[in-house]
Image (cartoon, helix red, strand yellow):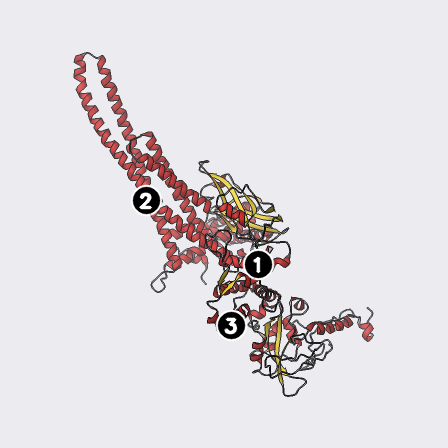
Amino acid sequence: MMAVWIQAQQLQGDALHQMQSLYGQHFPIEVRHYLSQWIESQLWDAIDLENPQEEFKAKRLLDSLIQELQNKAEHQVGEDGFLLKIKLGHYANQLKSTYDRCPLELVRCIKHILYTEQRLIREATNSSSPVGGMMDSMSQKYQQINQAFEELRLLTQDTENDLRKLQHNQEYFIIQYQESLRIQAQLSSLATLPPSDRQLREPALLSKRATVEAWLTREANTLQKYRLDLAEKHQKTLQLLRKQQTIILDDELIQWKRRQQLAGNGGPPEGGLDILQSWCEKLAETIWQNRQQIRRAEHLRQQLPIPGPIEELLNELNSTITDIISALVTSTFIIEKQPPQVLKTQTKFAATVRLLVGGKLNVHMNPPQVKATIISEQQAKALLKNENTRNESSGEILNNNCVMEYHQTTGTLSAHFRNMSLKRIKRSDRRGAESVTEEKFTILFESQFSVGSNELVFQVKTLSLPVVVIVHGSQDNNATATVLWDNAFAEAGRVPFLVPDKVLWPQLCEAINMKYKAEVQSNRGLSEENLVFLAQKAFSSSSNNPDDYRSMTMTWSQFNRESLPGRNFTFWQWFDGVMELTKKHLKPHWNDGAILGFVNKQQAQDMLMSKPNGTFLLRFSDSEIGGITIAWVAENPNKAGERMVWNLMPYTTKDFSIRSLADRISDLNHLLFLYPDRPKDEVFSKYYTPPLSKAVDGYVKPQIKQVVPDFATANPDPVSGNPTYMDQGASPAPVNHSHPYSMYSAIADPVLDGDGDFDLDDTMDVARHVEELLRRPVESQWGGQQS
């Protein structure tokens, strides 16, 4: 892959200008050039800028950067090399002086530079590489926005030229008007002269006055026309400004917020705000230039009042431009980093608020303070209706005030709340069956600041995504369900925080698949077969046809209020248990495709009965939250020639904290092939725990091994050094052929549960007993060394 810097040097036009503007005294372009390879090879993204504890990593990078610069300087030779050596040495000292006390700012600066360069390269590549005769839609959209900005720039330049021309003409008009007053004064003074002198001088003055007054009349009409033409041009500019602002704020920014919301469900990252900020800054700059022009036009009108409609027009323009800038400022006060949507009381949390136009409007010259408050859903509704909420809150947040900081290297103005904590929460009266984990709150961020030498004062507010407050970790999974449903199905512009009570099954599939991939951190999502299994579970259906579920709807109650038939847990609670188990203990096996998972007991039997003995598969337990079981086909030990499918009692997180899945599979010698036909060692051996070392200081280190009764001696492991383990026999009943999918009779068995599954706890108790025996010193067992 071609280095970013090599591609950046090939940029042209506006893109090249944007790239060059990234550099300055804060980070010289020469440093980027001579250390390009080193800069691009560092893990800048691995440093969390919001975590002060990461400062030591940033300091290490700063020191390395300075060392690299000094090394580069030392290796310069010749006349040109001498000058470069001095320059690079100077830059090394300059960077050390600038960032030694704030190394995280260096990281912020370089991350911003690299991100912007990559964006500019991507845009340039897309615009020059038509696909099927059409440019990439994103690039095309950006091009349209940039074209509109160019049109606005030309319009603003045109009105600036017209305004200067108007001012010049008006100044000349005033000079001529003063001349007419001087002539009039001269005519008035003739009355004191003798008649003969008056008659001699008066005609010339009268003629001159008539000429000047005629010119003033014509010029007054011309000035009035200039003013009206200028006002019409400003109307056109403001019209285009409104349109451009609507595209950026109501389309692009809203889409970014939607991506941010879906990222809360595990969707792709919402992306940086640099492009949006650059657009908003261009809007702010253009709006402010036009506002100043309109104010200057009003000043010219007041300086030389000429009767006509211009006064009303200018008032209207001034009102419109103020509305436009108000909308821009209030809409660009956004939450860059959302607070956690499942919020536990007495737990530290963070959030970041950013004003996209703060730098351009010089708000940072008097840094505003931002306050965070938690409010209820009802209070949020009242706030959006502009009802007086009397500064009510629904709880107390500690460390809820923060001053906005301006980062000169990136041009961002933001407030980083790093140590907030929800001390207490005041809950409202809940509706019907609603539980505390269905109650939604939001964090309100508000601030006040002025722009333009206190010409305009803004009170800005923004609401976080809905949060669910919990007081105990046991509430987390139900709270997550509320957040998942809200993030997935919230509609733009909704009343806080309304969501549909039911959604189409394919919509829900998209949401839970997104969540699953994010939680398990896997590119392997839920297959169509997995989703059919989930649909069967959700709707108590037996159909294997995906089309049968496409038009079906699932209600919130079915999702996480009502228990599944015959169970004491909901659909979501079961699914969340699967995610948690996979995330904590099964991730590599899921990624390898070793876990089928979403298969019921009947399907497992159908799949295994056609395979050789010793074939097994892994499926998630139907009857237990967060459980996975091994199903395998083998001979019935009690009846020669009869084959059966067996199911182990489900493993849970508790079991895997004792011994991993791979080691458990290794322990069970009767398991030979992972379905359909892969030798188990080929799949799992890379995850086996290495053999234990020899005895140390007279002790043998114990090891737990799993045993399944009646299968413990199958294919015994001859390798010496394996710990001894005890067998416990089992007496499973043969398949009752009148009920082909019920493998076990009603006869009680001490090792099997009610569903015919092995109870692994009993066998593990035996193993633990062996472990206790092995803990004793070698001396007491074999007469070895002193302990």
- Answer yes or no: do the residues labelled 3 and 2 have beta carbons within 8 Å? no
Establish if 112 lies above or below 694: above
Is the residue marked by circle 3 packed among few (<14), some (14-19), or many (20+) residues within 10 Å? Answer: some
Is residue 397 at all visible to an observer of this figure? yes
Helix, strand or loop at mark 3: helix
Establish if 627 lies above or below 470: below
Horizontal arrangement in the rendering, residue 203 relative to residue 13 (left or right): left
Cα distance, mark 3 to mark 1? Answer: 25 Å
Is the residue marked by circle 2 packed among few (<14), some (14-19), or many (20+) residues within 10 Å? Answer: some
The single residue placed furthest to the bottom in the displayed view is 641
Q: How far across and how far down the image is residue 369, in percent?
A: 54, 41
Q: Which residue is mark 1?
A: 480
Q: Amino acid at mark 2?
A: Lys
In the image shown, does 295 or 466 lie closer to the viewer? 466
In the image shown, does 20 or 378 lie closer to the viewer? 378
Which mark is first along the chain, 1 or 3? Answer: 1
Q: Amino acid at mark 1?
A: Thr
Quadrant placement of the C terminus? bottom right
Q: Nearer the viewer, mark 3 or mark 2?
A: 3
In the image shown, does 64 or 271 lie closer to the viewer? 271
Cα distance, mark 2 to mark 1? Answer: 49 Å
Q: How far across and how far down the image is residue 72, in percent?
A: 51, 54
Q: Residue at x 22, y 18 (%)?
A: 187
Horizontal arrangement in the rendering, residue 787 relative to residue 122 (left or right): right
Helix, strand or loop at mark 1: helix
Is residue 271 at all visible to an observer of this figure? no
Is the residue marked by circle 1 packed among few (<14), some (14-19), or many (20+) residues within 10 Å? Answer: many
Q: Amino acid at mark 3?
A: Glu
Horizontal arrangement in the rendering, residue 434 relative to residue 305 (left or right): right
Which mark is first along the chain, 1 or 2? Answer: 2
Q: How far across and how far down the image is residue 662, in percent?
A: 63, 72
Q: Which residue is mark 3?
A: 529
